Image (cartoon, rainbow, N blue to C red):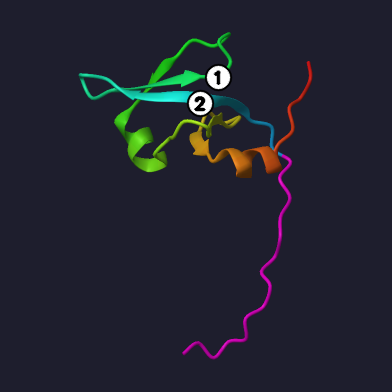
């Protein structure tokens, strides 16, 4: 048994700016590539590589996320929507 007393770990608040699109559909193509379709029809669907799919396991309803350093990720909708607010341009 761990003899250390459980303490609340430090908390952090996000202040990052990210690009994100809510995913409408994730389609595995016949060549095993994967295409993401978005709820906002102003953005064309695009393919993500097998490494992205294996690591992030994107699902419809969640968000495709791209950070300023071009790192790509996926976030469940609840976590994303609680942590980020749309910047109005």
Instruction: Please count the marks in the image.
Output: 2
Reading the image, the residue beneath label 1 is 39
Q: Where residue 43 sits: x, y (%)?
A: 54, 11
Vertical position of residue 47 compared to residue 77: above or below: above
**Pointer 1: residues within 10 angstroms few (<14), some, or many (20+)?**
some
Cβ atoms under marks 2 and 1 closer than 8 Å: yes
Main secondary structure along the magenta-highlighted residues? loop
Relative side of 34 to 68, left or right = left
Q: Distance between the residues labelled 2 and 1?
A: 6 Å
Q: Is 22 displayed left or right of 58 in the figure?
A: right
Q: Quadrant of residue 34?
A: top left
Q: Residue furthest right?
A: 88
Camera-side residue of 53 and 39: 39
**Residue 72 image point, x, y percent:** 49, 32
- Residue 2 x %, y %: 50, 87
> Vertically, is 83 above or below 33?
below
Q: Which numbered tag is attached to residue 82?
A: none
Q: In this view, does 69 lie to the left or right of 26?
A: right
Quarter holding residue 20: top right
Residue at 66% from the left image edge and 69% from the top image edge: 9
Report if residue 28 lies within the magenta region.
Answer: no
Is label 2 in a helix, a strand or a loop? strand
In the image: residue 77, left or right of residue 1: right
- The residue positioned 43% from the left and 35% from the top of the image is 58
Residue numbers of the magenta segment: 1-15
Residue 3 highlighted magenta (yes or no) = yes
Q: Which residue is drawn at 49% across and 23% down?
A: 24
Q: Mark 2 points at which residue?
A: 23
Q: Pointer 2: residues within 10 angstroms few (<14), some, or many (20+)?
A: many
């Amino acid at each position: 048994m761990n003899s250390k007393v459980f303490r609340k770990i430090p908390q952090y608040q996000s202040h990052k700016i990210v690009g994100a699109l809510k995913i409408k559909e994730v389609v595995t193509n016949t060549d095993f590539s994967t295409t993401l379709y978005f709820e906002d029809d102003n953005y064309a669907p695009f393919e993500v590589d097998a490494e992205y799919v294996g690591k992030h396991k994107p699902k419809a309803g969640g968000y495709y996320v791209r950070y300023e350093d071009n790192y790509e990720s996926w976030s469940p909708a609840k976590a994303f929507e609680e942590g980020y607010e749309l910047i109005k341009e």
